[in-house]
């Protein structure tokens, strides 16, 4: 899909609108860690220094909010989520990822979307470290999903077999949230077929 294309019923905006469903936390980097756990053989934790010292991936992708505005050509920089998760040795039965954040927010994402090649754990936005309002120190970004899935201030990646609602999903927001299939709310549009990212059951 062309990055110049606009998903159904979206409009281009000029600047980000900042949301913080549970407030904007102050994150202490001296104690912050990104943990990978759940259905994994070896839970693992990463410090911010370790994450940002690794070779980074940079690309330009548009940002799409479920409230129908989009920002064109945003530069994201970070690490592929798959590369952070694989060292933990994910159980092949894992079908979902839950992103947890320092202030208690969470978002559920199908494992095949969370671990796609273009799914990034972002540390920089448009060439600068994420601001507190944009999720410093880290947030996942999946270009094909609405932005509520891109949980700001993330500190945990949980691999799961069974689906659980995250924060907005409990209010009937869609389990996956694909922008091109206009999956805004549960039961609306899009047919989500399960695909395994790690082996077969």
Image (cartoon, rainbow, N blue to C red):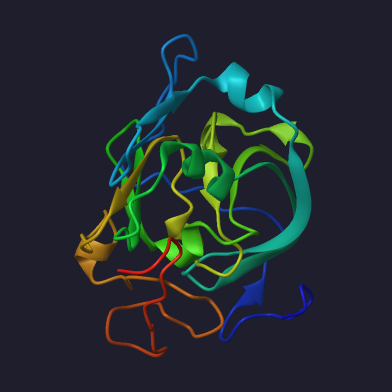
Of residues 101 and 119, which is closer to you in this image? 119
Q: Is residue 74 left or right of residue 105?
A: right
Q: Nearer the viewer, residue 41 or 157?
A: 41
Q: Quadrant location of residue 118?
A: bottom right
Image quarter (top left, top right, bottom left or bottom right) of the C terminus: bottom left
Side (left or right) of 195 relative to 131:
left
Q: Looking at the picture, how far across and down is residue 151, in whole percent?
A: 44, 47
Who's the residue at 46% across and 64% down the image? 197
Residue drawn at (35%, 33%) of the image: 42
2 shown above or below 116: below
Look at the picture and state if 36 lies above or below 69: above
Q: Residue at x 43, y 58 (%)?
A: 148
Q: Position of residue 22 (x, y in %)?
A: 31, 41
Question: How many numbered circles does the render carry?
Answer: 0
Q: Is residue 61 left or right of residue 104?
A: right
- In the rendered structure, the answer to whether residue 82 lies left or right of residue 194 reads right
Image quarter in which the N terminus is found: bottom right
Query: Horizontal and vertical percent for residue 143?
Result: 61, 64
- Among the 4 quarters of the image, the one containing residue 108: bottom left
User: Where is residue 110 drawn, in percent x and y?
Assistant: 39, 65
Front residue of this view, candidates 190 and 126:
190
Q: Residue furthest top?
A: 30
Q: Residue at x 48, y 58 (%)?
A: 114
- Quadrant of residue 77 within the rendered picture: top right
């Amino acid at each position: 899909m062309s990055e110049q294309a606009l998903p159904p019923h979206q409009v281009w905006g000029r600047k980000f609108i900042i949301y913080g469903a549970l407030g904007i936390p102050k994150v202490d980097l001296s104690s912050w860690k990104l943990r990978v756990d759940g259905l994994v053989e070896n839970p693992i934790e990463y410090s911010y220094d370790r994450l940002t010292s690794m070779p980074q991936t940079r690309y330009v992708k548009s940002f799409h909010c479920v409230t129908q505005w989009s920002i064109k050509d945003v530069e994201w920089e970070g690490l592929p989520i798959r590369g952070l998760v694989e060292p933990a040795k994910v159980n092949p039965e894992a079908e979902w990822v839950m992103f947890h954040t320092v202030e208690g927010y969470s978002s559920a994402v199908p494992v095949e979307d969370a671990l796609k090649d273009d799914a990034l754990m972002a540390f920089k936005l448009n060439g600068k470290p994420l601001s507190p309002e944009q999720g410093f120190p880290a947030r996942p970004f999946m270009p094909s999903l609405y932005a509520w899935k891109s949980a700001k201030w993330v500190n945990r990646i949980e691999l799961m077999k069974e689906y659980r609602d995250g924060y907005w999903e409990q209010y009937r927001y869609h389990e996956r949230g694909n922008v091109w299939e206009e999956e805004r709310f549960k039961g609306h549009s899009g047919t989500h077929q399960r695909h395994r990212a790690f082996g077969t059951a």
